Image (spheres, rainbow, N blue to C red):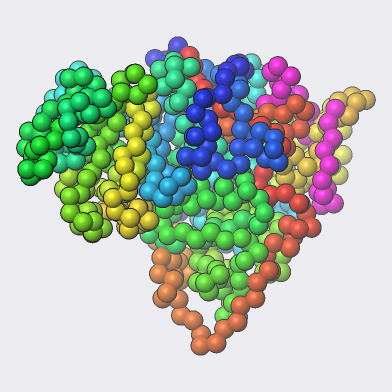
Amino acid sequence: MSYGSSPAPRANFGLRGHDGSAVPALARGLGGEAAKREADNMKRTMVLTLVALGAGSAGLYFFANSGGPTADTPRVYKSVADCVSARIQPAGACEQQWNAANLVHQKGAPDYASMEVCEKQHGAGKCVKPATPEDAERASRYIPIMSGYFFGKAPQGTFQGVPLYSILSDGAERYRVAEIRPKEPVDPVNSLEKSKTAGNGEGGQGGTSRTLLFIPGLAIGATGPAAAPAAAAAPANAARPGAMPASPTSPAATPANTAPRAQMGNPAAATKPAATTTSRGGLGSAARSASAGGSGG
Amino acid sequence: MHRVKCDQRPNFADRAEELGFKFHSIDGEPYWDETAYYEFTLREIEEDIEAPSAELQELCLDFAGKAVNDAEILERLLIPEQHWNLVRDSWKRGDPTLYGRFDFAYDGKGPAKLLEYNADTPTSLYEAAVFQWVWLEDSIAQKRLPDKADQYNSIHEKLIARLKGMGQKAFLHLACMAGSEEDKGTIAYIADCAMQAGHGTNMLTVEEIGLRSDGYFVDMNDRQIAWMFKLYPWEWVFADQFGQSPAMTHTRFVEPPWKAVLSNKGLLPYLWEMAPNHPNLLPAFFEDDPAKSVLGTRFAKKPIYSREGANILLVDGENVVGRSGGNYGEEGYVRQALVHLPEFEGRYPVVGIWIVGDEPCGMGLREDSGLITTDRSRFLPHAIVG
């Protein structure tokens, strides 16, 4: 194993400004990311998300079960003590994250009608009565204890403490994530607010839109039906408050691009003459003469 | 670097279904193959593959900056003169590139040798970025690989980050040719990443793209196409009727027009001229360049616009060791020194290195039972162990 060896010297990965223009901010961002990754010696994606491709319409989230030495690296912590002993962030931050996850846990933990059913799902000794039940109905039920939390930053957003539960899967103990369970009839805007206040941060979880979270090496868990269909249909666009930092690398920000790009994201604003005609089929003919297969390579 | 035999995951079919991987078999033949994987060391990845890829990307960008302003080079690359301004302007504006793939011959011993650069319409992206990644995570969880196993693959997060940097809440149209499940899968994946980067998306086929009488490209709903990802090669756009229209200057493309100077086998002789004896380059010449004689009788002859391994001729001494059919070649050829792909248990892998933005960030291997890698070759996962 050569994980401890120092990485090879690298070329400058930054975007070049064509024709001498300033190096865009994205390049600095990537540089920072690349530098962090060098420190981690971790060569793969931390959090893998699909919002439209996978089965079902609400998206898939996958977390690599690997820790890195920076505070932002997405990582599973099994307890405050686990977080402290990882020596990645100060003890105070560990406690804060645990508490944030616990808040989500108290409101959103799955519940069961009996201790027996709960333990069958989560293992012996892993279930309790809710400490701060919202109502009498919840007070009569049983919830699993929180067995850890997930914390970190990824391009998709910040995960500010996602509670984890142990679950028995084929006799082995694994972990699953909490399901956010809105009690009220679902209103997409309201549930968005709820997910924010619940500590899910700037949108990594997309509010209640997820149906499945998978923590490889640790867990597989289907978190039930999508609770907010509207958010599920467009999770990236609707359920991502504050997740889009402005970036000077945007072509739209380049003066030369202003005119055509002003149309982007607001196509309805494109001025359309009163009577236009549209012809089709003027692209694709070269393909037919060149190749029967796909255009890729 | 080793080829390690292994069993297919018991949950393979479920995973393919769950992850929307619809082209794991093509025409009844398996395309995704996890009955073996390639094992690398971190040193091999970082020193032999990643660092040279970054260096070659720099070299390619140097060449692009030179080529767009050089009539002789543009002619040599067969870019029609009426499109030179489009190519040049896109470079001068700094229209950003999303991705590309270098293909290398690499055996874990000598230096990786660049076979070609798929700079415009590379595919096998989704299987490298997503399905391969989940394979690794499953294999670790199922104790088939050690906990410390890793993969050279941050393609997914780099794509999202890059797309975030390419505009704010913009609307991206994505187009590919009708009829290819693989191409459809590729643009669906890029659309997914674009959504996660905050953009709106709409997918269509290139044949459906409309040219409106006011001079704009439009989709099937008559919505203007201001920004388009096209899985359709630039040389075909240049040859198509709509490619000649003024609408070409109103749309911003991914990949941008300047990629036409890189997604071209004519790049190979120029790279060799710029960096002769570079350890990761093979000597290469245009077919009509007398200097090609230094290659003697060991060479690969490739059409300037060949894709998916079409119309390649491999000559080794008196023997033709490989030949593929296809409809390319009228445009001219380049000749590249012959490098035998390494053999692993009767298979010949090509190492594809993904560039997102300008950063190499992932790898996918395709192997074939012959020396020419085509769209029928199989994709195998890899792991970094040790």
| Residue at image coords 21%, 37% | A110
Q: Quadrant of residue B256?
A: bottom right
In x, y percent, where is residue A50?
A: 42, 44
Q: Is A206 a magenta residue?
A: no
Residue lying furthest top in this view?
A1
Above-or-below relation of A65 to B82:
above
| Residue at image coords 69%, 18% | B344
| Residue at image coords 27%, 34% | A177
In x, y percent, where is residue B111?
A: 64, 22
Residue lying furthest bottom in this view?
A274
In x, y percent, where is residue A122?
A: 25, 25
| Residue at image coords 36%, 30% | A220
Q: Quadrant of residue B380?
A: top right
Residue B226 seen in render: yes
Q: Nearer the viewer, residue B290 or B312?
A: B312
Q: Nearer the viewer, residue B177 or A164?
A: A164
Residue B49 seen in render: no
Q: Nearer the viewer, residue A223 or B181?
A: A223
Majority secondary structure in the magenta region: loop
Above-or-below relation of B45 to A252:
above
Left or right of A164: which side holds A36?
right
Left or right of A162: which side holds A255?
right
In x, y percent, where is residue A225?
A: 33, 46
Magenta extent:
B321-349
Above-or-below relation of A127 to B263:
above
Q: Which quadrant is home to the N terminus of chain A?
A: top left
Instruction: Please give the count of numbered marks on the rendered protein.
Output: 0
Left or right of B228: which side holds B147?
left
